[in-house]
Image: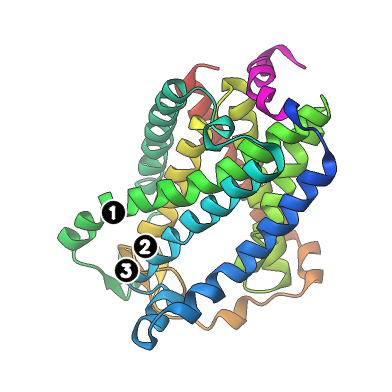
């Protein structure tokens, strides 16, 4: 293992008690089922007057409810890891005090970077906005949003960078295995975020790159604190800054552009061969790269 990744030796130690690939695959399959079926199960339990709010996510309560769903996924993961590996929640986090400090400094560094980028060109075109939500209520939702995002991003990091990265590192010393495979699974899970096949592939590429950045931070620190910090700051700006009217999960956005028909972005896969897509890919990769660099400078690793 490369010297910068020496902390990974200690981080993977809890996984060494059971390195059976079959048990890992069982948990992967069961967690994917949970991710797919979980929202439908919740919607079946909701009263009819709350169903649309949860499903659309065009109000603050709707988005917060969607994010809080990840608490159920966390409970499922903890149960499965205890059932198949005999270890618990904190074994997937790393040293707690250290993780909290890495979370704090990485989240602050990445948030500062994204805040600076907000005021750099290309600026938000205020004249083209359909709506700017009232500032005071928007600010009041920030603490609740951050708490919900800790649950959402924390769950994803515990699963992909905690459990899966640990388990694959216990199985193989090759970084492309324990960094690459969990990051690819993380990326594939974002395919449905796209508005069509080509857009879905771009989402997969972006999320896989983000997963690699978080995997690198985890290996350098021996905990998932910095990874959660980067992920949370990214998601906070994604959910809370700019959206499109009546698009899913825009209920917390401060600035809203006029509604557009999403089908106009339903590009076929052959679109990926066009020149402008290469530029788009470069921007996506660079956007993750600068966040990763900011977090690395903050944690001094």
Q: Which residue is mark 1?
A: 144
Q: Which residue is mark 2?
A: 64
Nearer-N-terminus badge (1/2)? 2
As drawn, the residue found furthest toward the bottom would be: 48
The x and y percentages for residue 34 are: 62, 63
The x and y percentages for residue 106 are: 44, 30
Indicate left or right for 288 with 177 as reference: left
Q: CA distance from mark 3 to mark 2?
A: 5 Å
Residue 10 found in image quarter: top right
Q: Which residue corresponds to the image point at 67% horizontal and 50% vertical from the top-left?
A: 186
Q: Which residues are magenta?
A: 1-15
Helix, strand or loop: magenta stretch: helix
Disc number for residue 91: none
90 up-or-down from 287: above or below: above
Q: Is residue 301 visible?
A: yes
221 up-or-down from 199: above or below: above
Q: Nearer the viewer, residue 146 or 263?
A: 146
Q: Which residue corresponds to the image point at 56% horizontal and 68% vertical from the top-left?
A: 38
């Amino acid at each position: 293992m490369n010297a910068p990744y020496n902390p990974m030796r200690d981080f993977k130690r809890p996984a060494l008690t059971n390195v059976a690939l079959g048990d890992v695959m069982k948990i992967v399959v069961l967690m994917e089922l949970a991710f797919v079926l979980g929202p439908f199960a919740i919607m079946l339990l909701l009263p009819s007057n709350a169903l649309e709010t949860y499903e659309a996510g065009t109000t603050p309560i709707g988005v917060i409810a969607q994010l809080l769903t990840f608490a159920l996924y966390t409970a499922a993961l903890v149960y499965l890891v205890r059932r198949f590996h005999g270890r618990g929640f904190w074994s997937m986090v790393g040293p707690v005090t250290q993780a909290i400090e890495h979370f704090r400094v990485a989240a602050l560094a990445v948030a500062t970077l994204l805040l600076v980028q907000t005021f750099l060109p290309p600026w938000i075109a205020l004249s083209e906005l359909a709506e700017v939500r009232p500032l005071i209520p928007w600010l009041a939702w920030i603490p609740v949003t951050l708490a919900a995002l800790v649950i959402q991003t924390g769950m994803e990091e515990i699963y992909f960078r905690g459990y899966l990265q640990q388990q694959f590192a216990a199985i193989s010393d090759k970084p492309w295995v324990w960094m690459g495979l969990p990051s690819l699974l993380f990326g594939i899970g974002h395919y449905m975020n796209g508005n069509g096949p080509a857009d879905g592939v771009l989402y997969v590429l972006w999320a896989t790159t983000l997963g690699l950045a978080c995997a690198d931070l985890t290996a350098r620190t021996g905990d998932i604190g910095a990874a959660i910090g980067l992920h949370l700051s990214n998601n906070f700006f994604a959910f809370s800054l700019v959206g499109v009217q009546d698009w899913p999960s825009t209920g917390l956005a401060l600035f809203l552009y006029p509604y557009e028909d999403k089908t106009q972005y339903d590009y076929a896969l052959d679109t990926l061969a066009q020149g402008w897509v290469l530029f788009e890919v470069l921007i996506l990769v660079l956007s993750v790269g600068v966040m990763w660099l900011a977090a690395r400078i903050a944690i001094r690793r």
